[in-house]
Structures are given as structure tokens and as C-alpha cells.
Image (cartoon, helix red, strand yellow):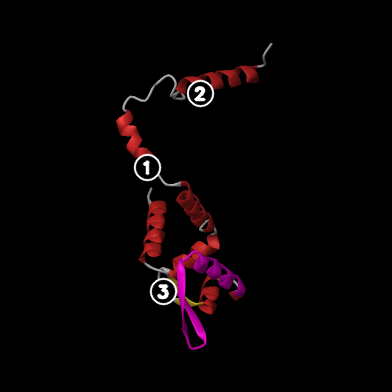
Amino acid sequence: MQSESDQSQVAVQHREQIETPNCDLHPIIDIEQINPLKHQGLHLEKAQRMAEFFSLLGDANRLRLLSILAKQELCVCDLAQILEMSESAVSHQLRVLRTMRLVSYQKQGRKVYYRLQDHHVLELYQAVAEHLDEE
């Protein structure tokens, strides 16, 4: 005899089977519509590169750095002060961002100033920030 928990689990599985579309039951109707889309999706290599890119952005300190650099070009010591991080930690994060080609730098005397690499980085940052601010 099944327990009440087992019975409810069976009921959920049954509902999922009913609600889950099954291509065997619903054959593709317009093959001419589907075929062009096969070549319009991301190629695996590019999808992997994009996934790596977004995973590297999944660090709060890197995003905080980008948020400041979206406003103004600054040196490591200024960034460290603003973000209340050590200069070493800021330098490490900037090195990762440079490798990803998100930031670039320019030496002025003994100081090195960092800025967003180009308008694409700023637009990406602004789009994500705007998306998160939407209610």
C-alpha cells in the first residue's frame, strides 16, 4: 500500500507527463520553417566562450569595479579606497577584467588609470543595471 506522500508524488509525475510536450505525439508541421533556424543559433564554440564570459562576470567585486569605472577612469589606489578593498585585491580583479577585455589601462607618470575597454562594455553594464531596476 502506498503512503499519502507516494500517492501525491505519483500524481505530480502523472500531471508532468500530461503537461510536458512530446514531439513524438506532435510531429513538426512546417519543416521549411524549422530548418533555417538550425543555422541561426549559436555555434557551440561561441556559446562556450559567452558562458565563460558571463561566469567571470558573476563576481560581485568585479561588478562593483565596473560600476565605478562606468562613471570615471581611476587608478588602483582610488578604486581600492572607494570599494574598501585592498589594492592587491583590486589589482587581481582588474587583471581578470583586462584578460576578458572589459577594461584597459593607461599609464600617466607612476600611476596606472583603468577605464572600461569600449562602449560595448558600458552598454552591457547599463543594460543589465536597467533590467534589474525594472519592477
Write down the residue under mark 3: 72
Q: What residue is drawn where x is 46% and y is 49%? A: 47
- The one nearer the camera, 70 or 82, is 70
Splitting the image into 4 quarters, where does residue 11 fall? top right
State the extent of the magenta-drawn residues as a range: 88-114
**Magenta-drawn stretch contains 96:** yes
Residue 14 position in % (x across, y down): 53, 18
**What quarter of the picture does the N terminus occupy?**
top right
- The one nearer the camera, 125 or 106, is 106
Say above or below: 9 vs 113. Answer: above
Residue 57 position in % (x across, y down): 51, 58
Residue 89 position in % (x across, y down): 60, 70
Write down the residue under mark 1: 39
Say above or below: 10 vs 70. Answer: above
Q: What residue is drawn where x is 55% and y is 21%? A: 13
Splitting the image into 4 quarters, where does residue 128 fall? bottom left
Q: Earlier in the sequence, mark 2 or mark 1?
A: 2
Instruction: Name the kind of residue labelled 1 in the image.
Output: His
CA gap between label 2 and label 1 equals 31 Å
Instruction: Name the kind of residue labelled 2 in the image.
Output: Glu
Q: Secondary structure at mark 3?
A: loop
Q: What residue is drawn where x is 53% and y is 77%? A: 76
Write down the residue under mark 2: 16
Say above or below: 39 vs 22. Answer: below
Instruction: Name the kind of residue labelled 3 in the image.
Output: Gln
CA gap between label 2 and label 3 equals 52 Å
41 left or right, relative to 61: left
- The one nearer the camera, 76 or 25, is 25
49 left or right, relative to 33: right
CA gap between label 3 and label 1 equals 41 Å
